[in-house]
Image (spheres, rainbow, N blue to C red):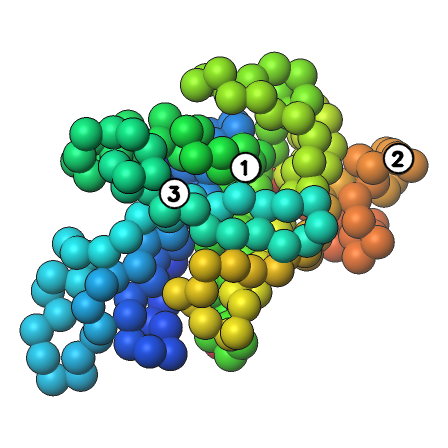
Amino acid sequence: RFKHENAEVVLAANGQLVVYMGDDERGEFLYRYVSNAKYSLNGDNSKLLEDGTLYVAKFADDLTGEWLELSPATTGFASQAEVCIHTRQAASKVGATTMDRPEWVAANPNKVEAYVALTNNKNRGIKPNEGGDPAPVNGPNPRAENNYGQIVRWAPDNADHTASTFTWSIFALAGNPLEHSDANAGSANINAGNMFNSPDGMRFDE
């Protein structure tokens, strides 16, 4: 259980179904589900969302990351049902990266990459999340008391959405360059004509 915002569904090159999900709360996590079975054009696909593996993202400051499996074996919970009920605690147990309110995820339909909107987090670098996890300033969440938010992009290794590792970058650090000259001005691609704050819903239109 967590505060789902959207679920971005992607069909991996090998036919497995991948679903990216954010937990819309300060200091929570980014998740991925990968089906065990593969999509069949003319077959029965009704069980694809019932049989698979749940993962949570861990971002490293060197712009790499990995998907950590959430299962009884990795979390110490007695069953997968408990993992799914206590998902935040499971993510904490494996050392996932606390994020600045992960909301919508959008996958690029023309390239193997995805984006997550991190709305804001006034508690970043100030106090832990609700589960008690420390929320220090880190690579994908680079500002304390983050009132503006950012959009993070990642590319799965080997152009494969089922890969266990990825590289990432900050696509846009929201801000207001008219009001600030520090990090709150935003990233270099933010200016007076396109500035915004608290990114939320987003999708590709083509």
SS class of the residue under badge 2?
loop
Residue 106 visible within the image: no
Left or right of 137 on screen, residue 55 = left
Q: Amino acid at mark 2?
A: Asp
Name the residue that disc number 1 marks.
97
Is mark 3 in CB contact (under 8 Å) with mark 2?
no
Left or right of 152 on screen, residue 194 = right
> Would you identify the image quadrant in which residue 33 lies?
bottom left
Left or right of 116 on screen, residue 86 = left
Q: Which mark is residue 5?
A: 3
Position above or below: 133 against 61 = above
Position above or below: 16 against 130 = below
Residue at position x 52%, y 27% in the image:
26
Residue 17 visible within the image: yes
Q: Percent x, y for residue 55?
A: 37, 48
Q: Percent x, y for residue 85?
A: 23, 30
SS class of the residue under badge 1?
loop
- Which of discs 2 and 1 lies nearer the camera? The answer is 1
Q: Percent x, y for residue 109?
A: 47, 74
Residue at position x 43%, y 19% in the image:
131
